[in-house]
Image (cartoon, rainbow, N blue to C red):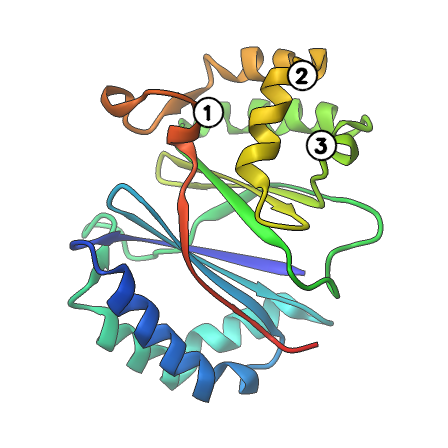
Amino acid sequence: MFTVVSVGRLNGEYGKEISEIFAEFDAATAPGIPGLKRRQLYSYYDVFVHIQDFTGENADEKAEAAAKDSRAAELHERLAPLITAYDPTLADDRAAPFYHWEGDPPVDKETGLHSTVIVNRVADEVVPEVARLFGELDATDFPYRMGTRRRQLFSYHGVYFHIQDFPSENGTAVIDQAWKQADPRFVKICADLDPLVKKYAPERWRSTADQIAHRFYLWEASA
């Protein structure tokens, strides 16, 4: 499965309106987009996160073709009053992947997965170290014990996205439980990441739940 993460900025509390536009688009168009498996929309303060999963052979090429489809341009025009560029000086809205781990068997054919999206900040120079730390963790049985089916890390001009796929919408509770159980491996990686990955909005920080984005829309292809 190939994942595309696009980032924008919300002009207001338009989750309902954005959902309606995407629902109309996906009902008419999404089933005809080759390889498109799932679409999820998230908000985090004023950050808009659009996650698309493509599956099958040459999934990356299918994602590129979908982005260039004229229907995608029409959708973007409809959304323009509600979602703007995260930074007007940036030409591309796509986050860069820098780490991927997937359980066995792969998640390509699974349905009903829920992505828990953690948003923070990360500097480009520490990205390799963050990837190394997660590589060490995921080489153990910890992700299986936690119930993680897939982990992906993306960065977008200093913004950090940590995406974990779980079998159901219990991702926040699972992460909370990992803290309560105090597995030494979980405690260690949190401590190791602390100087590398910074809070997105430290002035609003109250608890670890404050780093988790809110999913407000889901479309998934029928099996």
| Residue at the spot of label 2 | 181
Residue at the image position 49 percent from the left and 23 percent from the top: 126
Q: Is residue 112 above or below residue 160?
A: below
Q: Nearer the viewer, residue 167 or 132?
A: 167
Asked whether residue 59 appears in the rendered view, the answer is yes
| Residue at the spot of label 1 | 125
Q: Which of the two discs, 2 and 1, labels the residue nearer the N terminus?
A: 1
The quadrant in which the N terminus is found is: bottom right
Q: Quadrant of residue 99?
A: top right
Q: Which of the two discs, 2 and 3, labels the residue nearer the N terminus?
A: 3
Crowding at dot 3, Cα within 10 Å, few <14 / some 14-19 / many 20+, comes out as some
Q: Is residue 54 left or right of residue 9?
A: right
Q: Position of residue 4 (x, y in %)?
A: 51, 58
| Residue at the spot of label 3 | 146
Q: Is residue 64 left or right of residue 83?
A: right
Asked whether residue 189 appears in the rendered view, the answer is no
Q: Which of the two discs, 3 and 1, labels the residue nearer the N terminus?
A: 1
Label 1 residue SS: helix
Callout 2 amino acid? Gln
Q: Position of residue 86 (x, y in %)?
A: 25, 49
- The disc placed on residue 149 is none
Question: Disc 2 or disc 1, which is closer to the eye?
Answer: 2
Question: Disc 3 or disc 1, which is closer to the eye?
Answer: 3
Crowding at dot 1, Cα within 10 Å, few <14 / some 14-19 / many 20+, comes out as few
Q: How far apart are labels 2 and 3 at the CA level?
A: 11 Å
Callout 1 amino acid? Glu
Q: How far apart are labels 2 and 1 at the CA level?
A: 32 Å
Q: Position of residue 95 (x, y in %)?
A: 44, 49
